[in-house]
Image: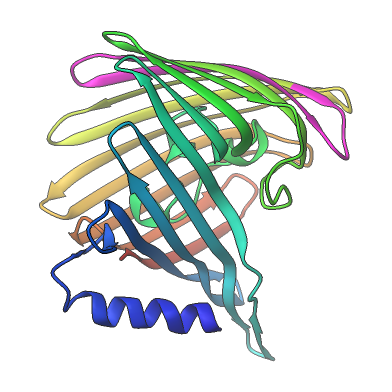
């Protein structure tokens, strides 16, 4: 609760400070270090079940210097949940703080960079946008949950060519706050390539990881994104094979976003996946309103070929 009060105080007083830039945070003194954060509230209705969740409440402290920088991100997941139906109501408050990101980066030269700490895995496009307000929809594709580790703790090397970027990830240890990840890792090795054209990007990755409570896995992803002033198209696919599961797990989704008007977007996403528990097809119909770049109101309908359907609406902001 104390961190929530602190965040509210920061937001209230920062707007009166010329060092504050909405969506980027409060600049501390005369050094390029910023204090910011984000919040996301989600309403969900599925049949008779309904709930309201403050699902992201985070504080960020980051800096960007001449040849180096750092990022620290501390998050409370599902800070407040209220569930209710015709018969009962239930409230729950979670105050456990997790370390989502904590890393230091250094520019070796103009073409290469090294990152040390806990960082986002460079696999696909969706996974490197970890904050609700930055994403097109409230819900995430199954792609980022079941194919590869969302975060890695170790070393990442980046090399920038004219139109291509190479990413190499090396983790040979337990992660920082490793329970706050989709896989609890013993190691993770990966390579990714991104090819950039004028208005499109192709991104591919391959990796291998071992879990503390499961067998070894290998995975591969491939994605394509193209954007114009009127629309944005994205398709991503991934496969994963693990020693402890005899079937190949996979996910492929295709999404198109139409810019209907300034600040108004319409989204359609279709997805097919198989993980350990099920094989399913989903479709998402969404609408997003962004009055400013760092604030979003979203609504969507998620439907499935299994008869599964739910309505989501959310408000998210970076401050």
Q: Is residue 112 above or below residue 34?
A: above
Q: Residue 232's image quarter?
A: top left
Q: Please tell me which residue is depicted at 85% across the width and 38% down the height of the picture.
A: 212
Image coords of residue 150 (percent x, y): 59, 39
In the image, taking residue 268 as reference, residue 175 lies left or right, namely right
Task: Find the residue positioned furthest to the top.
Answer: 162
Q: Please tell me which residue is depicted at 62% across the width and 35% down the height of the picture.
A: 152
Task: Find the residue positioned furthest to the front.
Answer: 30
Image coords of residue 100 (percent x, y): 56, 52
Image coords of residue 132 (percent x, y): 41, 55
Q: Nearer the viewer, residue 85 or 246?
A: 246
In the image, taking residue 106 as reference, residue 233 lies left or right, namely left
Q: Is residue 199 magenta?
A: yes
Q: Residue 159's image quarter?
A: top left
Q: Is residue 227 magenta?
A: no
**Over which residues does the magenta segment extend?**
194-217
Give the color scheme: rainbow, by chain, secondary structure or one colour: rainbow
Q: Quadrant of the N terminus?
A: bottom right
Q: Please tell me which residue is depicted at 38% across the width and 40% down the height of the picture.
A: 69
> Does residue 136 appear in this view?
no
> Does residue 28 appear in this view?
yes
Count of number-bearing discs: 0
Secondary structure of the magenta portion, mostly?
strand
Q: Residue 240's image quarter?
A: top right
Q: Nearer the viewer, residue 318 or 86?
A: 318
Q: Please tell me which residue is depicted at 43% across the width and 80% down the height of the picture.
A: 6
Image coords of residue 88 (percent x, y): 68, 91
Q: Is residue 111 above or below residue 261?
A: above
Q: Quadrant of the C terminus?
A: bottom left
């Amino acid at each position: 609760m104390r961190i929530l009060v602190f965040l509210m105080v920061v937001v209230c007083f920062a707007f009166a400070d010329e060092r504050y830039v909405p969506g980027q945070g409060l600049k501390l003194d005369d050094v390029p270090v910023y204090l910011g954060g984000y919040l996301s509230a989600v309403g969900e209705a599925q049949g008779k079940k309904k709930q309201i969740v403050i699902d992201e409440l985070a504080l960020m402290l980051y800096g960007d210097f001449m040849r180096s920088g750092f990022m620290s991100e501390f998050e409370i997941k599902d800070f407040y949940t209220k569930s209710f139906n015709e018969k009962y109501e239930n409230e729950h408050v979670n105050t456990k703080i997790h370390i989502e990101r904590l890393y230091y980066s250094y520019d070796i030269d103009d073409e290469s960079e090294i990152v040390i700490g806990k960082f986002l895995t460079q696999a696909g496009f969706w996974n490197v946008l970890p904050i609700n307000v930055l994403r097109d929809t409230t819900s995430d594709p199954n792609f980022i949950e079941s194919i590869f580790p969302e975060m890695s703790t170790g070393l990442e090397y980046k090399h920038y060519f004219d139109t291509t970027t190479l990413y190499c990830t090396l983790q040979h240890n337990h992660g920082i706050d490793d329970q706050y990840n989709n896989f609890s890792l013993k190691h993770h090795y990966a390579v990714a390539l991104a090819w950039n054209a004028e208005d499109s990007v192709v991104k591919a990755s391959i990796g291998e990881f071992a879990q503390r409570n499961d067998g070894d896995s290998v995975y591969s992803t491939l994605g394509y994104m193209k954007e114009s002033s009127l629309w944005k198209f994205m398709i991503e696919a991934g496969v994963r094979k693990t020693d402890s599961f005899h079937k190949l797990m996979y996910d492929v989704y295709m999404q198109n976003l139409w810019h209907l008007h300034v600040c108004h977007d319409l989204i359609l996403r279709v997805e097919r996946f198989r993980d350990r528990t099920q094989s399913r097809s989903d479709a998402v119909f969404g609408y997003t309103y962004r009055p400013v770049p760092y604030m979003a109101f979203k609504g969507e309908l998620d439907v499935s070929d299994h008869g599964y359907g739910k309505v989501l609406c959310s408000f998210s902001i970076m401050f």
